[in-house]
Image (tube, rainbow, N blue to C red):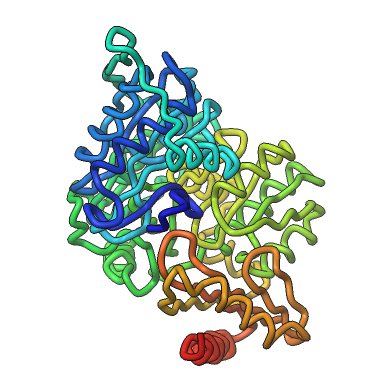
Amino acid sequence: MSIKKLFGTNGVRGLVNKELTVEMSIKIGAAIGTFFGKKKNLLLGYDARTSGPMFAEAVTSGLTATGCNVYFAGLASTPAIQYAVKNHKMDGGIIISASHNPPEYNGIKTIWSDGIETSHEQESEIEDIYFNNKIVYAAWDKLGDIRKIQGINEEYKDAIKKHVNIDRIATKKFHIVVDAANSVGGISLPPLLREIGCKCTTINANIDGTFPGRLPEPRPESLGPLSATVKAIGADMGVAFDGDADRSIFTDSEGTVYWGDKTFAIVIKQYLIKNPGAKIVTPVSSSSLIKDIVETYNGELVWTKVGSVTVSQKMKELNAKLGGEENGGIFYGPHQAVRDGAMTTALLLDIMAETGKTLAQLVAEQPQYFIEKGKINCSNEKKEKLQQEIYKQVKEENVSTIDGVKIWFKDDSAILIRASGTEPVFRLYAEAKNQEKALNLIEEYSAKLEKILTTI
């Protein structure tokens, strides 16, 4: 972890007891507490990781040492915690989670009073407090209190129901398979599905922070059991969560796994039919499919840098009501302008019920692009130099540098190359009208990056 920077693309993250330690977490908690100020009420929860309770205690110690009151929510999904911060009129919140990272990682995310993650500017303020020893501790008789808060998962589940036609969904008697990644995704969605008239089958639903079923990144190569289960029992759809359940990846009734672009495009189309001219916010990593759908249905597309914090903040700035990412994150503003896997699932079911179409039929209506992803290892110290060098090689192409380097080619294919903000890797996102071309782009540009790395 950098000695000058705590926050990455999405919170503070690191290897447990190596890059992110208990001692650091106490100090981070104190820096966050100083940022919010004495006697502020902050809600804290965590996902299923084995180190979650340990870091929750450490951060709580730092917060109460600066005079903040901590409302402890326990195990909950990230969107459930975010909704609770807003619903209970808290001054802010802290989420202990490393989202999609493997089990040996954990992280700390800060939430503003509206339930949205703090901006990168606010994160810089916390970093300044942390690194420049500006922490302000409270006197012995002014320490913060620790209280438990009950029922946030129920409140969150009930809030989602208000945004879909539950009676119409119930008439369809959908059967959904939920792959909860052995984490908090299994807490709210299965009960929600059953309450709106769906049959729900779960896999990897027991809470286990070692993630024995699969790693918490929902990728097609790890979702074979979900696909097989959907087909075997004749379910209508499958949904797989990441570790903190703010992202969701779906399969149709045949077990075909869809990247987030395709499901986001379904939601965009239905939203723009009812809200023509609306702003749709998405990172530059999204497929051209999103651009095609927004233009076809008379919306206004706003590109951003990659990262859920950036999308949420741009939505807040523009008062936009819909955003989304290719990784399965959909931000439904009427509920909350953050990624929300359970809300996304309910939206898709509502659209399927309203249109009378299966997920496969809804996807088949779209312009077809094939999406492939890749990554190469790259130390944090070499990231900036690598990006500069690859840009030099491709700058004569049709290139965007909103975030990383994105190249659009004349045959409607494209590739985005950018440094991860959470891991020591470079990520590649390629798309084309056929899968072979997309795979070739990943292979070609991975080789280019590897070659550059040998020279820097």
Whether 52 is drawn above or below 404: the answer is: above
Q: Nearer the viewer, residue 326 or 360?
A: 326
Direction from residue 444 to residue 276 in the image, left or right: right
Direction from residue 15 to residue 284 in the image, left or right: right
Q: Is residue 7 visible?
A: yes
Whether 166 is drawn above or below 439: the answer is: above
Residue at x 81% of width, y 46% of height: 277
Q: Nearer the viewer, residue 251 or 135?
A: 135
Whether 271 is drawn above or below 220: the answer is: above
Residue at x 23% of width, y 42% of height: 22
Residue 221 figure quarter:
bottom left
Total marks shown come to 0
Q: Position of residue 269 (x, y in %)?
A: 68, 54
Q: Residue furthest top?
A: 141
Q: Is residue 435 visible?
A: no
Q: Nearer the viewer, residue 300 or 52?
A: 52
Q: Nearer the viewer, residue 128 or 48?
A: 128
Q: Position of residue 359 (x, y in %)?
A: 51, 60
Residue at x 23% of width, y 50% of height: 205
In the picture, the quarter occupied by the N terminus is bottom left
Q: Position of residue 330 (x, y in %)?
A: 55, 50
Q: Position of residue 98 (x, y in %)?
A: 35, 51
